[in-house]
Image: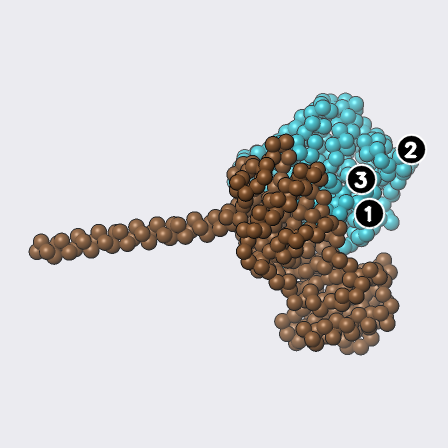
Chain colours: A cyan, B brown
Amino acid sequence: MAKKIGRRDFIKKSAKIGISTVLGSSVFYQVIGHYGCAPGEKVDLAVVTGSDYSENTIKAVELLGGIEKFVPRNSKVAILPNTQSRHPGTYTKPEIVRAVIKMCKEAGAEEVNCLSWLTRKHWESTGLAQAVEEAGANLKLIDSSDESLFKPIPIPNGRELKEAQIMKELYNNDVFINMPITKDHAGNKFTGTMKNMMGLNYRVNNRTFHKEDWQTNRSSIEFLDQCIADLNTIIEPTLCIVDAAEFITTNGPFGPGNLIKPQKIVAGADRVAIDAYCTTLWGMEPRDIVMINRGYEHKLGEIDLDKVKIKEVKA
Amino acid sequence: MHKIMGKSVFLVVLSLICLCLLLYSSEDLQNNLQHSLHKYIPDVTELDEWEKDGSTQEYKGEDLFLYIDGGAEIYHEYGFRQVVVQDYLNKNGKSISLEIFEMENSESAYGMYTFKTSAQGDVFAIGDEALLEGYYMNFWKGNFLVTLTGFDEDEETVKGLLGIARAVDAKIKIKGKKPPLVSLVPKKDLLALSMKYFKGNLGLYNTYPFFTKNVFALSEGLKADYSAGYSVYVIGYQSIDECQKRFREVKESFARSLRYNTFNSIDERLFSIRDRRGSVIFASLFEEYILIINGIVSPNQAEEIFTRIRENIKTK
C-alpha cells in the first residue's frame, strides 16, 4: 500500500485539476461557473445526432458554450476514453477523441494527455493510439500492476467504498474530460460516465468493488454499483462527452454484441443526467440502473430528465 | 548386528524410493490437473495454415477477473471453473483468439452459451450447439463453452474459425444435455435461437430488469421469445412450498413497485400488471414454477400459453 497523503495535501492537489469532494470544492468550477448555449440559456445536456461523429462532437460542445468554457489557455487536459475492447460499439471511437483533442488544442491547451492503465495493444487495436498521436496528444499508459503510481484518496461519503487509489498522473492536469462509450455491461447492465471512472482507479482496488466472495447475486451487483457511485464522489470531471453513436446492447462490455446506431454524441457535466439520458437510447429507464440511482442519492446529478435542460439538434 | 543394520538400510532406501515415486506421481497428477484444459487446444499439426501466437494463458476461479476485467461476474453466476486462452496467426497476419471455458456442468455451459449468443447467426454442427456471428463463434459441448474470435469476416478468417472450432470439438469427448426447463416452453411460434437460460438473477436482469433486487431468488430460469411479440419466462424452484412463498413475494413486489401500474390480482395464482412502456405482464404459479408472459399478449392468449406450459410440466 502506498503512503497515504494528508488531508491538506489532498485538497491542494485535488483542487488543481477540478476534483470536487466534500472536503473541498473545485477551484476550476468556481472559475468557470455555469455554461450556456446562448445568453440566458442554460443547457445541461447537449445531444447532437448525425452520421459525422466528429462534427457531432464539436457541435455538442458548442451547444454547451464552447470548449473555452471548459479548457482555459495553457491548461493541461486529461482525457479518459474507453478502450476496453476492440469490437465495434465497445470503445470510444477515434474520430470523437480526435475531435476533442483538436478542440482542446485550438482552445490553447498546453498539453492533452490520454490516460489509461490498459496496454498499448488495447489502444492500437481500436485505432485510438494512432488517432491520439496524430492529433498531437500524449498517450500516457500507467502500469496497472505498480501500486506506487496510484494515489490513495479517502472517500468520506462512501457508503461501501472508503478509499480509492487514483492514478497520480491525473493530478498533473488542470482539466479532466471523461469520454466513455455507453453500452451494455453484463455486470450491472449499463455503462457510461460513472462506470468509466473505474478506468482511473487502481485495478486491484477496482476488484474490491466486486466483493471478495465473488457472489454474483443482485445484492453484490448493488454493492458494485454503490462502489462506483462512491468513487464518483471524489472525482468530478470538468466535462463528459459520451459516444452514443454506435454501441452494443448485448454481450457487454467486451462484445461483440447487438450493435445499435443512434448516431448521437451526448455532452455535459452532469454525470447522472447523462447516464440517465443514455439509458433511454436503448429502451431502458434511468431508475432501472442501480448505479444511476446511487449517483442521484449522492447528489452527483439529476436523475429526472424532465428537470434537465436538454438541447437536442440534428447535424 | 550387520544383518539388522543391512535390513534397516534396505528399508530406509525402499521407503525413500516409495516416497520419491509418490511425490513424482503426485506432481505429475497436479500437472495434469493444472493443464487439463491444455489438451483441448489444437496443435499446429492439426490445423491448416494457422500457428500458435504466444503461449497459452489460463485463469482459474476468481482470477478470471484478471482476464475479463469488468465482465467476469456473469461467468461466475453460471458456474465458472477455469479458462484457457490461445491466439493463432496465419501467414497473412490474420488473427484468431480461442477461449475454452470449463463450467460447473453442461447446464452452466449451455446457459453461458445462450447468454453470449444472439438470435442472429449461422448454426453449425459443432459441439452440442454452435453459432457463428460474423467473426465471432461460440459452441458448447458437455461442460465446456468454446469461444473463437477473429478480427474480420474475411473468408480465410471464417475458415480458420471453423477449422479451429472443429479441431477443439474433436478433442472434447463428452456430450452435454440441455436443462429440462428447455422442454417446458411452447414450441408454437417460438423464435429460433431466442432462448436464454439463467442460473441467477444477473442473467435475468440482463434480459429484462423486472426488479433491481433479487425478488425471484432465482437459481434457475429460462426465457424464450415468440414471433407474436411476447416473451415467456419459466422460473424453477426446489419445492412447491418454496415456489408458493416466492410467488407471494413476487406478487407483492410487483404491486408495490413504482415501475409498474394497473396491477390486477386475478386469483391467488395469477395476476397481471403493466410496465411503464405499456407492456403487459402475466404471472402464474404452477407446481414448483413461476410462469411469466411479457409483451404484446391478450388475457386469452396468456391463458392459452399458460395451459400449454402446464401440460408440458405435467408430462415432463
Read off the chain for label 2: A
Please tell me which residue is depicted at 23% across the width and 54% down the height of the picture.
B14
Residue pointed to by mark 1: A281
Q: Is residue A305 visible?
A: yes
Residue pointed to by mark 3: A245
Q: Quadrant of residue A27?
A: top right
User: Residue B187, labelled with which disc?
Assistant: none
Label 1 Cα neighbours within 10 Å, binned few <14 / some 14-19 / many ≥20? some
Label 3 Cα neighbours within 10 Å, binned few <14 / some 14-19 / many ≥20? many
In this rendered view, identify the residue nearer to me: A186 or A198: A186
Q: Amino acid at mark 1?
A: Leu
Image quarter where the C terminus of chain A lies is: top right
1 or 3: tag closer to the N-terminus: 3
Q: Position of residue A164 (x, y in %)?
A: 61, 42
3 or 2: tag closer to the N-terminus: 2
Q: Is residue B315 left or right of residue A274?
A: left
Residue pointed to by mark 2: A39
